[in-house]
Amino acid sequence: MMNRLLITGAAGGLGTVCRDRLKHMAKTLRLSDVVDMPPAGENEEVVVCDLGDKAAVEDLVRGCDGIVHLGGRSIEDTWSVIRNANIDGVFNLYEACRKTGCNRVIFASSNHAVGFHKQSTRLDANALTKPDGLYGVSKVFGEAMASMYYDKFGIETASVRIGSCFPEPKNRRMLASWMSYDDFVRLIECVFRAPKLGCPIIYGASNNATGWWDNREVGFLGWEPQDRAEDYRAVVEQMEEMPAIDAPQVVYQGGVFTVDGIHEE
Ligand code: NAI
Ligand code: 15L
């Protein structure tokens, strides 16, 4: 068990799940976000902090043995928003790790780092990145920072290219990209349990029948996703009509993100 595990983005969708479900992993959970969160409970610390604030992030990371880095802009936005949260924020986080000796991170990357790959292509960890917007580019940047801080300083990171992590799949595309909360929590447990992690790329999806991703390279983690989007197929197919054959949500892995323009300031 770790002494202190930091969860960034703790007020967000996945952060709220992790706050609730990762209590067993550390004596203390340090929970951080730029917006207010419910007050600290037992064995919790709550720190409001902007990831773009270098000094504040160093203070935030000091004393932590591991980080689940979920904080940042989680969809497409203007460059200034993306840059502050996902570019400067990631730099500040890794610099804080280097200076304070925090050695293991889960980086919430995204399928949008490879969003311009076709759904007919199966990707593994060696696939070329093909970001589908500024947000996707920021996730590629985060993965590159993880790689450099591992090679140079030995800081280990699991970059998880999360598909669609929600209570249930919301549309036909998510029948392939969905990851259940339970499978995400199981993955986090595996990452912190591994004696030697290195710096792997992991695709974050459940055990879906129509998936696009191959996680063979991270078999050593022992992560076996249990849930299946297929169980929701009937409901999803009722909810969403079959899109046209050339619609982005059936052509590209990143779906409609591929047709979102550049968000001007
Ligand atoms: P979310 O948007 O609900 O949570 C992100 C949190 O980060 C928010 O609470 C927000 O206030 C915080 N944040 C934003 N800018 C910040 C800043 N400058 N400083 C500090 N905190 C800041 O997103 P969600 O769904 O919980 O995702 C968590 C992470 O996982 C994000 O990094 C997202 O990009 C990534 N991800 C999530 C997927 C999903 O399906 N939920 C899919 C792929 C990636
Ligand atoms: C993401 O990266 C987003 O954070 C999330 O909100 C979803 O849009 C997800 O990708 C997805 O592609 O479904």
Image (cartoon, helix red, strand yellow):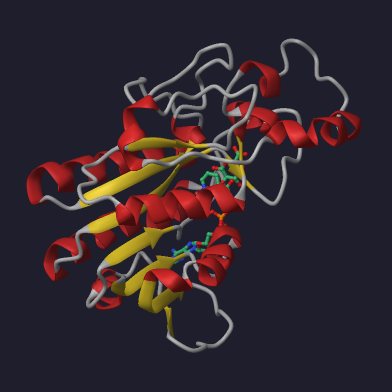
Residue 243 to residue 9: above or below: above
Q: On the rendering, which quadrant does ligand 2 occupy?
A: top right
The residue that appears at 17% across and 42% down in the rendered structure is 148
Q: Nearer the viewer, residue 119 or 58?
A: 119
Looking at the image, which residue sits at the far right?
A: 238
Q: For residue 20, what is the image quadrant? A: bottom right
Residue 17 to residue 235: above or below: below
Residue 68 to residue 197: above or below: below
| Left or right position of 61 against 183 | left
Q: Is residue 80 visible?
A: yes
The residue that appears at 55% across and 80% down in the rendered structure is 36
| Left or right position of 105 against 84 | left
Residue 101 placed where, x, y %?
14, 66
Residue 2 placed where, x, y %?
29, 71
Q: Nearer the viewer, residue 70 or 218?
A: 218
Q: Is residue 86 visible?
A: no
Residue 211 placed where, x, y %?
58, 24
Q: Nearer the viewer, residue 215 or 115?
A: 215
The residue that appears at 19% across and 59% down in the rendered structure is 103
For the N terminus, the quadrant is bottom left
Residue 252 placed where, x, y %?
59, 20
Total residue callouts = 0
| Left or right position of 30 against 35 | left
